[in-house]
Image (tube, helix red, strand yellow):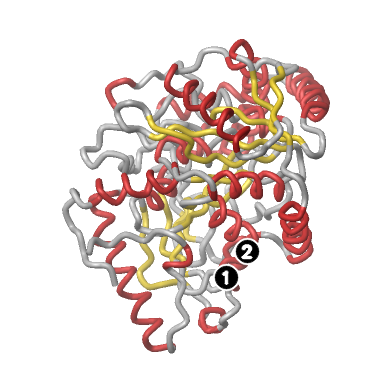
């Protein structure tokens, strides 16, 4: 059988220590071999990074589960390169989110690719472009900037991965690769030990096959008090009424691929059949306007966080990355604070729409995965994702259909700040009564059979 790790429950292990360690080593070797074709990892760990005591604890949620970590997040002894040839440092300690995963028994498999300084949604960096596992022929962009994490999950190298999301960087590659990606509320998961792009918007989020798996990984990432509150809210959501889902009219959605729109409307009808109360409303601000406000704020902060490289003409940055960073340096303080005020206004108005008991449903991306030959540098890939970061909200992207030529489509359950449990519960309920995520897994497994370097599953 081809090496293909899928659901968390199929990857957890509590064997005796010797067997457990041997399995971890075998899996790491399979990941290393398989990665030569998939290219999801920029660095595979020399040996499994794990906590033996947590591995042996039957209560550990992630015992023996290999996890890919986006190459912005520090793992002790591993390089953190930010997707750039200009950065070459080795982390001396674990980021708190990594320490939390290890305490739950996770095995850190290595560092997954990111676009340079996490600034592009296409999924290409100077250090490489991962395969989008919807097609073994390598015809499609994987999406970014958490490109390697999405590729690692979709290809079956790992059942879950960590990404970061500043304007859609967990959700865009999840959409294009056909997996589930969670962007939680800012401040819920520590970003200490995580290279910053924009402190106003950065979050660390899990990527997995399903909302249930993403939610379980998310639990392990949260500090104790927040985790307790999250789990209690999940229990209340399971006992309570389904939330009202707000869908948007065509005018509010703007320019959207017809097949993505068809999947969105079909999902609306199916949600009604599942018993979700639904409403159709316009949004108080256009997506393009909110994306523009986000771009200005993140551009300033991106420059300030990375100017040591952007201002150095000898630093080997890609021209596009350098120009984008320097553009942020040309925005003055007056304009920056004006943008922050506009962002506050957007949040106030959107929170009027996203009252407790109500979630917004929007497409994740305007198209399914784009062919490599159809690159468009002027296209805003985060048109439906940036606004969530702008309003300090939370969102989970889930598969919701396929195009005629077999590419997954995706939609988001969006909530206001602190509604993390509500969106995870709603998405999990949706997936319990649909099988788009299961069909995407089948597509991935079938495509991966056609790749070389296929070790048997340990």
- Residue at 58% x, 26% y is 384
Please indicate, yes or no, whether residue 86 appears anywhere in the rendered image.
no
Q: Quadrant location of residue 54? A: bottom right
Give the image location of residue 78, x and y in percent: 45, 62
- Residue at 40% x, 82% y is 20
Marks 2, 1: nearer the viewer: 1
Q: Nearer the viewer, residue 412 or 373?
A: 412
Task: Establish if 9 lies above or below 127.
Answer: below
Which circle marks residue 61 in the picture? 1
The quarter of the image holding the N terminus is bottom left
Is the C-beta separation of discs 2 and 1 under 8 Å?
A: yes
Q: Quadrant location of residue 344? A: top right
The image shows a total of numbered marks equal to 2
Q: Nearer the viewer, residue 329 or 50?
A: 50
> Which of the marked residues, 2 or 1, is nearer the chain's N terminus?
1
The quarter of the image holding the C terminus is bottom left
Give the image location of residue 347, x and y in percent: 78, 28
């Amino acid at each position: 059988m081809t090496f293909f790790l899928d659901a968390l429950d199929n990857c957890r292990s509590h064997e005796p220590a010797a067997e457990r360690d041997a399995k971890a080593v075998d899996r790491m070797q399979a990941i290393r071999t398989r990665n030569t074709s998939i290219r999801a990892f920029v660095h595979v760990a020399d040996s499994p990074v794990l906590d033996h005591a947590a591995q042996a604890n039957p209560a550990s949620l992630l015992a023996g589960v290999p996890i890919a970590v986006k190459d912005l997040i520090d793992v002790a002894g591993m390089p953190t390169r930010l997707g750039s040839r200009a950065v070459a440092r080795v982390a001396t300690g674990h980021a708190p989110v990594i320490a939390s995963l290890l305490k739950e028994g996770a095995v850190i498999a290595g560092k997954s690719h990111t676009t340079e300084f996490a600034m592009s949604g296409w999924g290409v960096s100077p250090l490489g472009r991962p395969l989008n596992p919807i097609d073994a022929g390598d015809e499609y962009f994987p999406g970014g900037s958490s490109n390697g994490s999405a590729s690692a999950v979709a290809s079956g190298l790992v059942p879950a991965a960590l990404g970061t999301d500043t304007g859609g960087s967990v959700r865009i590659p999840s959409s294009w690769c056909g997996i589930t990606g969670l962007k939680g509320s800012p401040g819920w998961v520590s970003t200490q030990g995580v290279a910053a792009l924009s402190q106003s918007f950065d979050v660390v989020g899990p990527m997995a096959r399903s909302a249930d798996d993403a939610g379980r990984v998310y639990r392990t990432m949260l500090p104790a008090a927040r985790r307790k509150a999250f789990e209690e809210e999940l229990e209340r959501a399971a006992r309570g009424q389904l939330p009202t889902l707000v869908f948007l009219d065509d005018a509010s959605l703007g320019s959207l691929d017809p097949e993505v729109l068809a999947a969105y409307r079909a999902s609306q009808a199916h949600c009604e059949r599942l018993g979700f109360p639904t409403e159709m409303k316009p949004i108080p601000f256009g997506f393009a306007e909110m994306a523009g406000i986000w771009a200005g704020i993140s551009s300033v902060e991106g420059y300030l966080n990375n100017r040591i490289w952007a201002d150095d003409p000898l630093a080997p940055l890609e021209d596009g990355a350098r120009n984008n960073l320097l553009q942020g340096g040309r925005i003055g303080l007056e304009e920056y604070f004006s943008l922050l005020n506009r962002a506050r206004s957007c949040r106030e108005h959107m929170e009027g729409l996203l009252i407790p008991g109500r979630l917004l449903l929007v497409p994740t991306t305007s198209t399914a995965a784009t062919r490599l030959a159809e690159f468009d540098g002027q296209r805003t890939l985060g048109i439906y994702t940036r606004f969530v970061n702008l309003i300090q909200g939370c969102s989970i992207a889930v598969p919701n259909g396929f195009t005629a030529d077999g590419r997954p489509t995706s939609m988001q359950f969006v909530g206001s700040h602190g509604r993390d449990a509500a969106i995870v519960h709603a998405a999990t309920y949706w997936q319990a009564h649909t099988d788009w995520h299961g069909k995407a897994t089948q597509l991935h497994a079938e495509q991966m059979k056609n790749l070389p370097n296929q070790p048997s599953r340990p």
